Image (tube, rainbow, N blue to C red):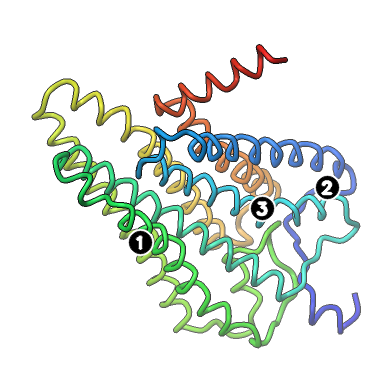
């Protein structure tokens, strides 16, 4: 690559044996992407079209699935093009933009899960005040905060780094994530501290808030009737499973950046592909199977399709 091209483009060096298995990679990941689109969009459409699902709990589920779909769309099209390309490269500006979307949407996942936890807390612990507290305006405010706060917090370091000097043009990965920081000649202590603050603000605090609300729900459910305990289990279990899933995702993302070159390239490649496949498919499966009302509408929809077919 010419010196001018090196200044503009970043080499994605995390790919393994693309020349030998490019078509296999492409077919598997393309099928996964289509499945992700179909599964997430089907449940979102069911929630939008069914009047009895126009409740805060299901609105937050639809927002979470939509967010997951956007996160996948940020990664999959570029990844699929890389599998079919001779060189796996990305422009520096596009890399920063992908990194920005990756972390802003990931932060939104945790904030949406926090909103869902708050909704379940009010529903189970303060049922008589539920309609007043979880009004339409409250839901809108929570959704706006869940999407706008991560955008504002992750945009600042990305904009500030646009003109930073690069000392290397090779990224150890197949997508632009926190590893971008390893490209710079000088690592800013201010940005490192800011990154920790954002991590605490968008991940750690929401996680503790979720655990706090669900602990209160479990305590109150244990003291209440069997019907309340059943309702708590049916509505809270899917959210907890999704929280565990996203916690594993963030743990992997942070760990892989810290280990950097010490982590085997093949293991990094396989684990990243698994994360890209499992994570966005986990949500629709959990909510489609574990939430009774959604499952009922999905079963009715597929039965109708089967009969018409």
> Few, some or many C-alpha atoms within 10 Å of disc 3 (few <14, some 14-19, many ≥20)?
some
Residue 58 x/y as whole percent:
40, 40
Image quarter of residue 142: bottom left
* Residue corresponding to mark 3: 73
Residue 222 x/y as whole percent:
13, 29
Comparing labels 3 and 2, the label whose residue is closer to the camera: 3
Image quarter of residue 219: top left
Of 19 and 33, which appears nearest the observer?
33
Cα distance between the residues tagged 1 and 2: 47 Å
- Side of 215 where 224 appears, left or right: left
Circles 1 and 3 in contact, beta carbons < 8 Å: no
* Residue corresponding to mark 1: 141
The quadrant of the image that shows the C terminus is: top right
Q: Residue placed at 85% from the left, 41% from the top?
A: 21
Of 16 and 302, which appears nearest the observer?
302
**Secondary element type, mark 1:** helix
> Few, some or many C-alpha atoms within 10 Å of disc 2 (few <14, some 14-19, many ≥20)?
few
Q: Residue furthest top?
A: 307
Q: Residue furthest front?
A: 51
- Side of 217 where 261 appears, left or right: right
**Secondary element type, mark 3:** helix
Comparing labels 1 and 2, the label whose residue is closer to the camera: 1
> Few, some or many C-alpha atoms within 10 Å of disc 1 (few <14, some 14-19, many ≥20)?
few
Of 305 and 168, which appears nearest the observer?
305
- Mark seen at residue 17: 2
Q: Up-down: is 252 above or below 218?
A: below
Residue 301 x/y as whole percent:
57, 22
The quadrant of the image that shows the N terminus is: bottom right
């Amino acid at each position: 690559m010419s010196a001018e091209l090196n200044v503009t483009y970043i080499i994605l060096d995390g790919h393994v044996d693309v020349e030998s298995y490019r078509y296999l990679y492409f077919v598997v990941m393309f099928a996964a992407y289509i499945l992700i689109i179909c599964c997430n969009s089907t449940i979102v459409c069911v929630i939008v079209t069914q009047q009895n699902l126009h409740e805060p709990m299901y609105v937050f589920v639809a927002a979470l699935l939509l967010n997951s779909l956007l996160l996948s769309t940020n990664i999959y099209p570029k990844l699929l093009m890389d599998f079919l390309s001779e060189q796996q490269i990305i422009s520096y500006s596009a890399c920063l933009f992908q990194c920005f979307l990756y972390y802003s949407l990931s932060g939104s996942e945790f904030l949406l899960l926090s909103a869902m936890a708050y909704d379940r807390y009010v529903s189970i612990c303060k049922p008589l005040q539920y309609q007043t507290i979880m009004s339409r305006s409250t839901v809108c405010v929570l959704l706006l905060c869940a999407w706008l706060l991560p955008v504002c917090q992750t945009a600042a370091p990305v904009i500030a780094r646009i003109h930073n000097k690069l000392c290397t043009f090779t990224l150890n990965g197949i997508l632009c994530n926190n590893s971008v920081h390893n490209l710079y000649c000088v690592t800013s202590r201010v940005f490192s501290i800011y990154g920790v603050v954002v991590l605490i603000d968008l991940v750690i605090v929401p996680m503790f808030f979720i655990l706090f609300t669900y602990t209160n729900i479990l305590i109150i459910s244990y003291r209440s009737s069997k019907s309340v305990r059943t309702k708590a289990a049916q509505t809270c279990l899917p959210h907890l499973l999704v929280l565990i899933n996203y916690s594993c995702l963030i743990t992997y993302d942070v760990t892989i950046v810290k280990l950097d070159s010490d982590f085997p390239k093949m293991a990094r490649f396989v684990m990243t592909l698994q994360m890209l496949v499992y994570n966005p498919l986990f949500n629709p499966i959990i909510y489609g199977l574990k939430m009774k009302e959604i499952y009922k509408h999905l079963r009715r929809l597929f039965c109708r399709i089967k009969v018409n077919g």
